[in-house]
Image: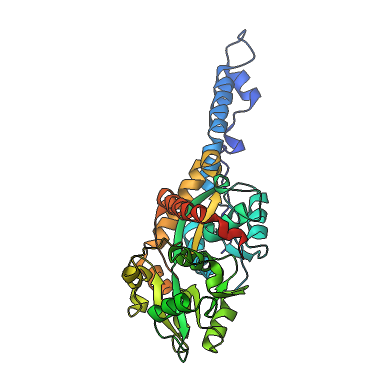
Amino acid sequence: MAPRTTTTPFAPARTRPSEGALQDAQPRGQRSIARRPLLWMLGSAAVSAKMPTAWAASWPSQPITIIVSTSAGGGFDNMARNLAPALSRELGVPVNVLDKPGGAMVLGTKYFLSRPHDGNTLLVTGPAPYWYFDINKFHAGYDLADFDILNVQWADKTGIFVPTGGRFQSFRQIVDAIKAKPGTVSCGVVRDSGEYFNSGILLDNLKLPLSAIRLVTYEASAPLRTALAGNQLDFGLVSAEASLGMLSLMKPVAVFNDVPIPELSNAPTVNDVLKADGVTVDFVPSSMRALVTYSDLKEKHPDQYSKLQGAYNKILHDPAFVAKAKKQGIATDWLGTAKSLEKIKAAYAIFDKYKALLTAQ
């Protein structure tokens, strides 16, 4: 779709009276600066004063780019590419997706911050857990105050999975084995992930050190799932929703959530299993996926901000869009800015409580 053109609200040149005609119309002896040219100039000034509002109303007039701070093909990229055509229809301009992976989301996030803060660049990223690591472990140089979280659209839960032919077939069996023979049970997690934190939180609440499990770390979730499917691990912590396509090869035995999730209805919550131990554990999200803009956009360009937020809200409440996203395994939650930030800060409070895990890997 071609970008919309901006209409400049000036009067056509032919409507301006000529100086000679105005002078001829004046009685002899009057001042040469006529009243009507003066009124015309004042009118032109009034029109010019309205220019910022008219320009804002025309936004956007050029393509919008969604930066994704991960590689193509993952959940963040899928969310952005699912959203892009819908935003394009609502805003009337092309919406492109640009993947900028690297440095635990640092490279893509810094690239986003370097762009003009005019509403024409958006970011799909992971405020939790990835930004927490960026800020507190890698000292990336940015923090939450630099961003406006339009919405946390998708928050994964951590699932505990075992190989279908593995030696453990329940979370209870795993816990009992870790207690009986610390260091003999292997567990796979993605490095610097919510799952890694949840493994440490679990052991801390069981009064066990991180060394009580034989931790195997991976750079991404795909090789971790492959290892589980190949019976190379006793169990693994990985995104529950993103693992639904591999349930024939690995079995969910528990989930870090307040209630069981419908897609894994036979998997109890971690805290339900641990009731027998008198233990209740905190947990952090596997991954929050959010659409983000700049913290100063609302103040600098309130009309653009309102138009963007309204379009996004409308999309996530469109039954056709929701149905299509569901088929692709993409969540369409609408929390809005305030509740999204509240959810992120609640996760950060749990991260802070177990901050020692940042350097324990």
Q: Quadrant of residue 35?
A: top right
Q: Quadrant of the C terminus?
A: bottom right
Q: For this view, does 259 lie left or right of residue 296?
A: left
Q: Is residue 65 visible?
A: no
Indicate the position of residue 175 as horizontal and vertical percent values. 42, 76
Picture mark count: 0
Q: Quadrant of the N terminus?
A: bottom right
Give the answer, above or below, for where 234 lies relative to 293: below
Indicate the position of residue 179 as horizontal and vertical percent values. 45, 75
Q: Single out the residue that lies furthest toward the top.
A: 29
Q: Is residue 181 visible?
A: yes
Q: Residue at x 50, y 47 (%)?
A: 305
Task: Work out whether residue 215 or residue 130 is closer to the camera in this orientation and state it.
Answer: 215
Q: Single out the residue that lies furthest toward the front.
A: 180
Indicate the position of residue 263 as horizontal and vertical percent values. 36, 77
Give the answer, above or below, for where 144 lies relative to 330: above
Q: For this view, does 138 lie left or right of residue 256?
A: right
Q: For this view, does 206 lie left or right of residue 233?
A: left
Task: Work out whether residue 298 or residue 214 is closer to the camera in this orientation and state it.
Answer: 214
Task: Work out whether residue 262 or residue 305 is closer to the camera in this orientation and state it.
Answer: 262
Q: Residue at x 51, y 75 (%)?
A: 182
Task: Work out whether residue 8 or residue 351 is closer to the camera in this orientation and state it.
Answer: 351
Q: Residue at x 36, y 61 (%)?
A: 317
Q: Residue at x 65, y 24 (%)?
A: 19
